Image: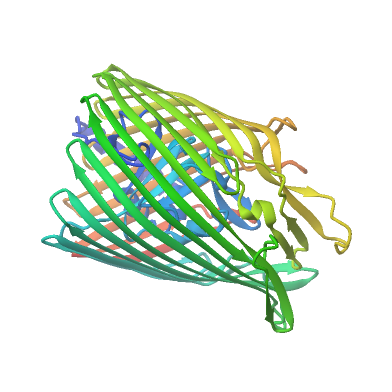
């Protein structure tokens, strides 16, 4: 297999150089960085776009499948689950959006890597670094915005897929569908994915990978009131059943999760020369039921019931002023409601009884409001300055002011230097303040801390970018000074805690410093072949203890080789990632180094029908901690009309 991959890569590269030529490149446009349409080469902030073409090339079905190949993004492992980390920041410092909208879910993005499916995704925009000046709390580390498709003609796609790990473990079956059309002023799209995965069990009967059943459905309706003005309704539904197994005192326990989410949005938008505006209201409702049962007899040991609701009213207007200033003014009101058996606030107290057990919980409602202004100032043809500032306030926390400034200076038409400074913040969540979670399986207790403060950061970065013929490259340095970083820390258990339990609470680390270097190169050898590579160096420290923050690899390398022969209807993709010097645990010291390779290919049999197949983790790497559970083989059919 290794020889085959090397030969394939050499053949692709050699044939490309034989016919290398200047390739006509289209301008990439990003929305998330400024809340306006802007070309990436002009935006003075760290931006990455994952296109629909890349999503299909990888065969990505879920966000997890594609996000790992983004620059400076890693996974942090916590409580047996993967969490997103941008530039070494915690997952809670990453704001996940769908079409610019927040959605209700876990306080940590524990399950979203698998919940967010790709069947109706047009592209994914990633902003690295604080962007609280436009998005407020949670955008301390960056933003990942999933942009969905808006059809302009009839389109139908159907994709059944089957996959399994070596030995038949973790068998996975899924079906994805997309249907969209536009007729005169009216358009719609309907999409969804149904997925079923069997568990991947350890020799002890616990799970490396959970048993999963998941259904996602999305509906988009839009009506063009005029050439420039549209009314849009979005609705989405997600249901998820998960079962994992853990070991406690020699007994195997089952963690049973049932999650549902409903999302509804109504928006009015206008886009014309020199004037854009958006007025939108949306609501996201998330329900979580959890049970802990013994596998042997099915007896219930613990349960939880949680509901979270996020309601938002937002608006913005962008107006060109004096031709050199593009000014955006916006604001939002957000109400977040949380009710659950895992928090103790003393308000709205309730008790639930189930199979002889009872659980008591309470609720909390938090109101947030904010206003912001941004000026995209074209000082000269080769100099762009973007200034923005946002004011946030809340009925629970102190007010915050978040400024950001960025400069793009074009030294040459295809060579530029960029510099940026931004401040960000994240308010404590109800979990941080009020949680009271007791888990008898692994025997731990997590308690809230009402005394913790908001996290704050200041980030500086500078970069050089340029293109020459078939080459494009970027080199950047960033420094992030974080104050009062919230981390879960082990403490002495309070009186009355059963013997042998571990106890944790949330505390502010007085100071953390995270700095790094990012480098990337793209070689567009021909219309058929592209090669990309990126390298990220990360130095993340808890300055209070003068120790490295765990699970932040010092070195990450990504490589992509993509071959697309349209005349043959053949696509071949070889992607790889290297993780080097990843401090997994401090005591005892445990360093993780590994490399993973992924290959996929597809062949059009007719104009509307294709076969595809791939292997993730080609060389069958295994590590029970991460976990790496060996090679995953998948294949499917793709129908397009």
Taking the spot 33% from the left edge, 61% from the top edge, the residue there is: 119
Question: Image height check: is 388 above or below 369?
Answer: above
Q: Where's the C terminus, which quadrant?
A: bottom left
Taking the spot 67% from the left edge, 61% from the top edge, the residue there is: 343
Colour convention of the picture: rainbow
Asked if one can make out residue 73 in the rendered structure from this viewpoint, the answer is: no
Asked if one can make out residue 206 in the rendered structure from this viewpoint, the answer is: yes
- The image shows residue 183 at horizontal and vertical percentages of 12, 63
Taking the spot 73% from the left edge, 57% from the top edge, the residue there is: 446
Answer left or right for 388 relative to 79. left
Question: Image height check: is 549 above or below 376?
Answer: below
Answer left or right for 89 relative to 36. right
Question: Image height check: is 133 above or below 123?
Answer: above
Q: Nearer the viewer, residue 484 or 411?
A: 484
The residue furthest top is 411
- The image shows residue 338 at horizontal and vertical percentages of 58, 61
Q: Nearer the viewer, residue 532 or 435?
A: 435
Question: Image height check: is 418 above or below 223?
Answer: above
Give the quarter of the image for residue 471.
Answer: top left
Give the quarter of the image for residue 479.
Answer: top right
């Amino acid at each position: 297999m290794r020889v085959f991959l090397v030969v394939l890569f050499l053949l692709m590269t050699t044939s490309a150089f034989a016919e290398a030529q200047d390739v006509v490149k289209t301008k990439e446009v990003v929305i998330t960085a400024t809340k306006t349409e802007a070309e990436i080469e002009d935006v003075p902030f760290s931006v990455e776009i994952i296109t629909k073409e890349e999503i299909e090339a990888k065969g990505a079905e879920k966000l997890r499948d594609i996000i790992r190949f983004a620059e400076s993004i890693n996974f942090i492992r916590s409580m047996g689950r993967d969490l997103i980390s941008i530039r070494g920041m915690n997952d809670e410092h990453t704001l996940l959006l769908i079409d610019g909208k927040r959605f209700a879910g876990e306080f940590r993005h524990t399950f979203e890597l698998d919940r967010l499916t790709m069947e109706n995704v047009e592209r994914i925009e990633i902003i690295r670094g604080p962007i609280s000046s436009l998005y407020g709390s949670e955008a301390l580390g960056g933003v990942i915005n999933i942009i969905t498709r808006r059809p302009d003609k009839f389109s139908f796609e159907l994709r059944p897929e089957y996959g399994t790990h070596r030995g038949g473990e973790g068998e996975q079956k899924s079906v994805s569908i997309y249907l969209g059309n536009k007729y005169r002023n009216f358009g719609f799209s309907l999409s969804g994915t149904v997925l079923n995965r069997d568990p991947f069990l350890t020799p002890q009967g616990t799970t490396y990978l959970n048993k999963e059943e998941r259904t996602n459905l999305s509906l988009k309706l839009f009506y063009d009131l005029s050439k420039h003005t549209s009314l849009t309704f979005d609705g989405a539904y997600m249901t998820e059943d998960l079962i994992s197994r853990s070991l406690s005192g020699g007994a195997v326990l089952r963690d049973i999760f049932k999650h549902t989410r409903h999302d509804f949005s109504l928006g009015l938008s206008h886009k014309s020369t020199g004037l854009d505006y958006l007025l939108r209201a949306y609501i996201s409702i998330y329900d979580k039921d959890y049970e802990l049962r013994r596998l042997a007899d099915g007896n219930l040991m613990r349960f939880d019931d949680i509901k979270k609701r996020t309601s938002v009213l937002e608006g913005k207007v962008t107006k060109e002023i004096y031709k050199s200033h593009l000014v955006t003014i916006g604001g939002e009101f957000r109400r977040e409601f949380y009710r659950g058996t895992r928090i103790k606030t003393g308000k709205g107290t309730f008790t639930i009884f189930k199979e002889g057990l009872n659980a008591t919980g309470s609720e909390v409602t938090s109101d947030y409001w904010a206003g912001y202004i941004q000026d995209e100032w074209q000082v000269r043809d080769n100099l762009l300055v973007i200034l923005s500032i946002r004011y946030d306030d809340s009925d629970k926390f102190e007010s915050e002011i978040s400024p950001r400034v960025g400069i793009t200076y074009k030294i040459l038409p295809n060579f530029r230097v960029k510099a940026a400074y931004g401040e960000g913040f994240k308010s404590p969540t109800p979990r941080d303040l009020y949680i009271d979670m007791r888990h008898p399986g692994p025997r731990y207790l997590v308690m809230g801390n009402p005394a913790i403060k908001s996290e704050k950061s200041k980030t500086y970065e500078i970069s050089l970018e340029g293109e020459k013929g078939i080459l494009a490259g970027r080199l950047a340095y960033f420094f992030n000074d974080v104050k009062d970083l919230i981390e879960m820390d082990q403490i002495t258990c309070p009186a009355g805690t059963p013997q042998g339990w571990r106890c944790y609470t949330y505390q502010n680390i007085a100071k953390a410093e995270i700095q790094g270097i990012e480098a990337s190169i793209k070689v567009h050898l021909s219309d058929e072949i592209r090669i990309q590579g990126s390298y990220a160096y990360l130095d993340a420290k808890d300055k209070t203890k003068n120790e490295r923050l765990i699970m932040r690899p010092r070195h990450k390398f990504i490589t992509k080789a993509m071959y697309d022969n349209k005349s043959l209807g053949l696509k071949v993709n070889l992607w790889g990632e290297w993780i080097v010097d990843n401090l997994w645990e401090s005591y005892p010291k445990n360093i993780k180094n590994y490399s993973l390779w992924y290959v996929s290919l597809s062949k059009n049999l007719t104009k509307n029908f294709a076969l595809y197949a791939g292997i993730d983790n080609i060389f069958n790497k295994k590590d029970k901690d991460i976990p790496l559970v060996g090679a995953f083989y998948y294949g499917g059919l793709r129908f397009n009309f």
